[in-house]
Structure formats: structure tokens, C-alpha cells
Image (cartoon, rainbow, N blue to C red):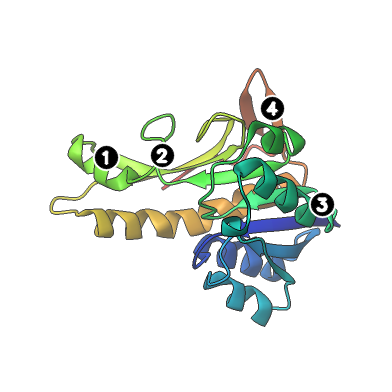
Amino acid sequence: MKNIVILISGRGSNMEAIVKACAGEQWPARIAAVISNRPDAAGLAFAAAHGVPTVVVDHKAFADREAFDAELARQIDAFAPDLVVLAGFMRILTPGFTRHYEGRMLNIHPSLLPAFTGLHTHQRALQAGCQFAGATVHFVTAELDHGPIVAQAVAAVQPGDDEAALAARVLKLEHRMYPAAVRWFVEGQLGIADGRVRQLGGQAQAFS
């Protein structure tokens, strides 16, 4: 039974999808905790209502990133995690923190990486005239929004799309893709070689 710790900063809709899939599909894992850097994160109420322990590590209480990350790691490690999942966790992590969880921390980013790292991804995709947008699940490295790609979801840009419409369509794909990727990890179905991730069971790593 593997322990999963999920980090959130807001409503945590991807966290909700993972919690529901873990229980409904009876993964060989449990959601050991949901941790937020914001005490007002809406996702904390959902986690508590589903019997998942919650912790708040308020980044505003720390003098610098290093101090915050040190306390965050201490709280995470108290749950002996096999996997740390970033689900809308809006903090840039220090290299020391990412090294500590190397190979066992996943993130989801709302673009088809390596395109559009950082913020406002859907707006930037529309401004660039992209015909497709999407999201990427990847292992976390010290470089922001980089790391070996586990899965990608692709959505066609529709005529008349604005940022909100495109984001909503991509988010529905995220809610399918991220739980699948986490399940692959806990079931030992992911292999990494030369920076590339392979789904060892032969399942498609592309979602649409």
C-alpha cells in the first residue's frame, strides 16, 4: 500500500479527481494527506470531508523559500510518502526540495510542454494562434515546468474560444489523465530511460 501526499493551493479539482479515483478504483494506495500553502484553500474542506488528513503550511509565515520548503518537507515526510502529487500547488520549489523527492513527485501543467511554461498558458496559446492546447503530467525537476513527461492531453482550439472556455475543456481532460498517471506510478507501471517515460503496460500516454 503506497502513501500519496497531495499539495494544493486552491480548489484542488485535480486532487478531488485523484481522491475519488483512488477510492473508486481501489488502487493499492491511500491518500495519506492533503497539504496546502494557503489556509483558505477550498480543497481542504473536500479532503477533510473524505477522511483525508489536512495540513496547512502557510508560506507567508516564512522568511524565504528555503525555510518554507524545509517545513513543507518535514510535514510531507511525516506521512512517509511514496509519491508527492502537485495539484495546482502555486509555489516555485527550491532545488533542494525537488532533489529530495526526485523520481517520486508529479506535477500537472496546463500546456503541452515544453510549450508555455509558467502562467497564463491558455491565453498565450490562443494569442500564438495554436490549433491545439492541452495539459502535461511530468516528473518534477529543479527546472520549472520541465522534467520527464508521463502523459499529455490534447484539446483542439475551437473557433470563438476564449481563455475560460479553453481552460474548462482542458480541465476535463486533466481530471481523466492525472488520476491515470498517478495510478500508473503506484502500480509500478512507469519506467524512465534517457529522460523518457514509458507506460510499461502499453497503455496510451496521450489523452483526448
Which residue position is annotated with label 2?
A: 118
Kindly identify the residue that appears in the image at 59 percent across and 56 percent down.
59
Secondary structure beneath label 2? loop
The first of marks 2 and 3 along the sequence is: 3
Circle 2 residues within 10 Å: few <14, some 14–19, many ≥20: few
Instruction: Answer left or right for 78 relative to 129.
Output: right
Real-space CA distance between mark 2 and mark 1, rounded to the nearest whole angstrom: 12 Å
> Secondary structure beneath disc 4?
strand
Mark number displayed over residue 192:
4
Circle nearer the viewer, 4 or 2: 2
Which three-letter amino acid code belongs to the residue tagged 1? Ala
CA distance separating discs 1 and 4: 29 Å
Q: Are marks 3 and 4 in contact (CB under 8 Å)?
A: no
Element under disc 3: helix
Q: Is residue 166 left or right of residue 127?
A: right
Disc 2 to disc 3, C-alpha distance: 27 Å
Task: Name the residue beneath numbered marker 3.
Answer: 77
Of callouts 4 and 2, the N-terminal one: 2
Q: Quadrant of the N terminus?
A: bottom right
Identify residue type, mark 3. Asp
Q: Position of residue 83 (x, y in %)?
A: 74, 48
Residue type at mark 4: give it.
Ile
Residue 68 seen in this snapshot? yes
Residue lying at 65% horizontally and 82% vertically, measured from the top left: 49
For marks 4 and 2, give the CA distance: 24 Å
Q: Position of residue 119 (x, y in %)?
A: 37, 44
